[in-house]
Image (spheres, rainbow, N blue to C red):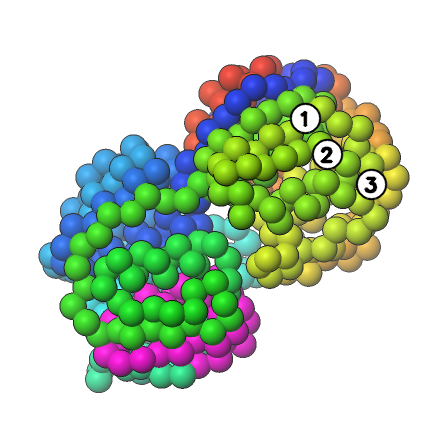
Amino acid sequence: MSTLLIEGRHRLSGSVDVEGNKNAALPLLAACLLTTEECVLTNVPRISDVEVMARLLLDLGAEVEGIGSTTLRIRCPKVVKDEPDATLVGRLRGSVLLLGPLLARRGRAQLAPPGGDFPARRTISTHLEALAAMGARQLEGAGHVLETPDGLHPTSMYLYEASVTGTETALLAAAAAPGITEIRNAACEPHVVELCIFLSQLGAGISGAGTSTIRIEGGAKLHGAEHRLWGDYIEAGSWGVVAAVTGGEIEVKGARAEDMEVVAAVLTRMQVACTFDADVFRVEASRLKAAGRITTGLWPGFPSDLVSLVTVLATQAEGQTLVHDWMYELRLFALEQLSGMSADLFLCDPHRIIVTGPKRLRGRPLDSRDLRSGMALIAAGLAAEGQSRLSPLETVERGYARLVERLQGLGAQVSRL
């Protein structure tokens, strides 16, 4: 495992490009299993989570070219097994997206407990309920064992939770079920829309993408397609916060303006001077003010994936900010490490934290317990006096490609140990 050595109090500035959205790449890779023809994905993020998913496809019998590059070519004339490698599954929560395609191609799927951030607290009950509604039957066995003795069939379903990956699981299965499936209380995030577009390119009939009701006409023979992934707005927002927290200026290229709007809305409330136009997001040096209250929400609300970063930003803003992440319990717990950096925090409960600023942070050893809070702690280290050491760095590199290289390109004094 690697450690990131950070020398703080250096103003970051410059330009950075973002690649495709990690949360779109994983379901699109899973969708490639639905067809025997070649699929080509471009602008793929060069991150470890994508590599793990690509290797899971290889394990199932797919041919995958370009692992580690921004272009992947996938062909899957045969699916040779219905139980993906348990070690790889244990490293990636997104492996749950393989259930639908496996049931479509093999009629059976056996999945070890998916890994990723906080696996014990993030269940896949929504996914299992959606598959059960389409004819999947759960069997006894290690992990999750499903079979469809009569094949997948279309249905009308209401998702108890507007889960992003739960909606994607339902979409992937519905694309293979002959007839019309309707998903209500579906997630509306851009990466769900992107999966709908890709499934349409494969030959499925889909309407309602981006709304809470999606209709899928499935069962047709799916063919190959080529798709360029949309830029990752979460990563673009992360770079914006890194610039703002160090008093710097940055130009982020590659994310769509319509995706950046929800990010810019919160940063603007904190008096961050930012603009977005076409695929360019700009942040200028700003005097930060407390936002009063920041609450995460389902799309188009403020994304939970950025709540840790704006909490760090609030430590440098004048006044008090209540940060409320009602979606996940443990993101804010990881930020208790900021107290050891002299941040003024009051953790109200697992979902709410009060931040009073501005406070001059002090460097210290940091533990990257999950992907997003790990990036937030890097931002804190960049703003702090003295040295910080964050480990394991690999946790953050699951979602941020060439992280050390790009930080150095912006003027950060960082190195990998």
Circle 2/circle 3 CB separation < 8 Å: no
Q: Give how far across and how far down residue 296 sits, in percent.
A: 67, 55
Question: Residue at left 69%, top 29%?
Answer: 244
Q: Does the stretch in magenta take in 248?
A: no
Left or right of 373 in this view: 165: left
Does dot 2 land on a helix, a strand or a loop?
Answer: loop
**Front position in the image: 153 or 127:** 153
Q: Is 273 situated above or below 264?
A: above
Q: How far apart are marks 2 and 1 (CA)?
A: 7 Å
Q: Earlier in the sequence, mark 3 or mark 1?
A: 1
- Amino acid type for the residue under numbered disc 1: Glu
Residue 174, magenta (yes or no): yes
Pinpoint residue 18: horizontal percent, then vertical percent.
Answer: 46, 34
Amino acid type, callout 3: Ala
Earlier sequence position, callout 2 versus callout 3: 2
**What is the magenta range?**
157-186
Q: Residue 325: x and y, percent?
A: 69, 55
Q: Alpha-carbon distance for marks 3 and 1? A: 17 Å
The location of residue 171, given as percent across then percent down, is 36, 68
Q: How many labels does the image show?
A: 3
- Regarding mark 1 in the picture, which secondary structure is present there? strand
